[in-house]
Amino acid sequence: MIVRASGPLSRFSIFLLLNMFARLSIAVCLLASLTSLGVLSNPIVVRDSPISLPVAKRFNATGIANILKTDQARAHALKKNVQNANTGVEARRLSATDAAFGIPSTSYATEYVVNVTVGNPPRPFRLLVDTGSSNTWIGANQILRPPPSARDTGNSLWVEYGSGIVTGEQWVDSITLAPGLTVHNQSFGIALLAVGFETVDGILGLGPQVLTYGSLFPDATAFVPTVTDNAFAQGLIGAHSIGISFAPSKTLDGVTNGEISFGGVNDSKYTGEINFVPLTTTYPSSLYVGINQTITYGASKLPILSNNAGITDTGTTLLLIATDALQAYQAATGAEADPDIGLLRLTPAQFSKLESLFFTIGKETYEFTANAQIWPRELNSAIGGTDDFVYLIVADIGTPSGYGMDFIDGMSFLERFYSVYDAGANRFGIANTEFTLS
Ligand SMILES: *[C@@H]1O[C@H](CO)[C@@H](O)[C@H](O)[C@H]1NC(C)=O
Ligand SMILES: *[C@@H]1O[C@H](CO)[C@@H](O)[C@H](O)[C@H]1NC(C)=O
Ligand SMILES: *[C@@H]1O[C@H](CO)[C@@H](O)[C@H](O)[C@H]1NC(C)=O
Ligand SMILES: *[C@@H]1O[C@H](CO)[C@@H](O)[C@H](O)[C@H]1NC(C)=O
Ligand SMILES: *[C@@H]1O[C@H](CO)[C@@H](O)[C@H](O)[C@H]1NC(C)=O
């Protein structure tokens, strides 16, 4: 996600126009909702154990044809950050050449979605789970009137993603993440225009709050607390953290095999201990759920990527690494780029010799098996491939190492491990699961 704090006049005008349109078109609803505004009086229950929200995974057979392009567009957007000199806060802006509408607005190739309800009476929405952005919004692909219980903040919302854009109006209402977990006074957007989100109703942004900086107008220096931030502040969960459990799947049909635990970890989802490391301070990875890691290949521990900063991201499908790291990987494996798909590919004979990658994070080393490094062969035709080859999910991030974001551990990586984003302690945790060596 890229938040724009300012930009060329043309886009600014569009923004203002949409903003005006927003206000006009919802004026009636607003009048209605003002009369029903009341102080929320639900009793607050503090919990020790986390509350979990099931996550469904779905491949989009059309979308995955563009898997590499989609991920690289997102990586490009995630990397383009600037320091906001006026406030000293790290804000992120697009350069003039990255016109919002010039970014390919392909949809996410694999979608990880949760069901939440908004407002009272509760209305259900299917939202993408995204730890690489932090604004929550609803109303893609529909003309959505704010719930009667919603309160207008007077702000407009503008967020750019590698794969799309959303602009709309910012509201406050309750969001129910799971039975027993209703977050009150949550600030979120209702889209007027959302491009690139054909199959979902919006996004549940679970990343660091700093990513919301510059997303509102006119309160351009405001931060928007995430649902996790508010749930913790309201005493609904006992820890300011989320535990993330996903699993690999080999079918195009949707499967509900993931889980986000708010306020802690689910001990039955991992094996051994959770290894915590501080979030990286290297910019721009420091804006995200960023860490440092080292990558080697095979029993000989061939260096692929030296200790460098990058991020973990549920909104990226592949495992993206710096260009020189990918070249080292390609040389080690003998892989060649498929001319049509762009992904690296191996012959079955080469694949039989593929060795594990090893990720050193903090003091621990995690094995990423040969099976983990490949696109599920059952789904080769869905990405335009054939059975003659094995396609690799390790791909080029588009910049050489030393950039400050030298990898994106996307879902292909996260599906093999349990991970924790602990915003309260500013740390990331990782553990093996039953899927790590499978
Ligand atoms: C933790 O995971 C187990 C096993 O998958 C599941 O049965 C249980 O419901 C989960 N616990 C919570 C609090 O969601
Ligand atoms: C979301 O709700 C739909 C419709 O009720 C259901 O089919 C789907 O399984 C739910 N998904 C999750 C992740 O709970
Ligand atoms: C897949 O994505 C395309 C856009 O890339 C979209 O038009 C289509 O509706 C999606 N299909 C499904 C089944 O979600
Ligand atoms: C929500 O906001 C209202 C009005 O600002 C306030 O009175 C109430 O205490 C808040 N509720 C929670 C749970 O923070
Ligand atoms: C993380 O990697 C960056 C290079 O990307 C390096 O400058 C920094 O010192 C590293 N931090 C730690 C704690 O190793």
Image (cartoon, grey):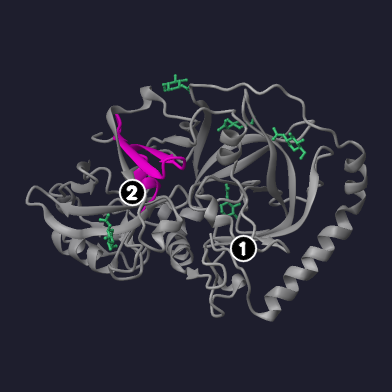
Q: Which residue is mark 1?
A: 214
Asked whether the beta carbons under mark 1 and mark 2 sit within 8 Å of each other, the answer is no
Looking at the image, residue 63 lies above or below residue 247:
below
Tell whether position 432 is magenta: yes
Element class at badge 1: loop
Q: Earlier in the sequence, mark 1 or mark 2?
A: 1
Left or right: 9, with 204 as reference point: right
Q: Tag 1: Cα neighbours inside 10 Å, few (<14), some, or many (≥20)?
A: many
Residue 168 screen position, x and y as percent? 73, 57
Please say whether residue 376 is visible from this viewpoint. no
Q: Nearer the viewer, mark 1 or mark 2?
A: 1
Task: Check residue 375 in the rendering and tell me which mark sits there, or answer none.
Answer: 2
Residue 70 location in percent, x, y?
47, 61
Pinpoint residue 217: horizontal percent, then vertical percent: 71, 63
Q: Is residue 375 magenta?
A: no
Three-letter code, disc 1:
Gly
Give 257 or 14, whichever is nearer the viewer: 14
Which residue sits at x=37%, y=66%?
340
First to last magenta residue range: 408-435
Front residue of this view, candidates 166 and 262: 262
Q: Residue furthest left?
A: 300
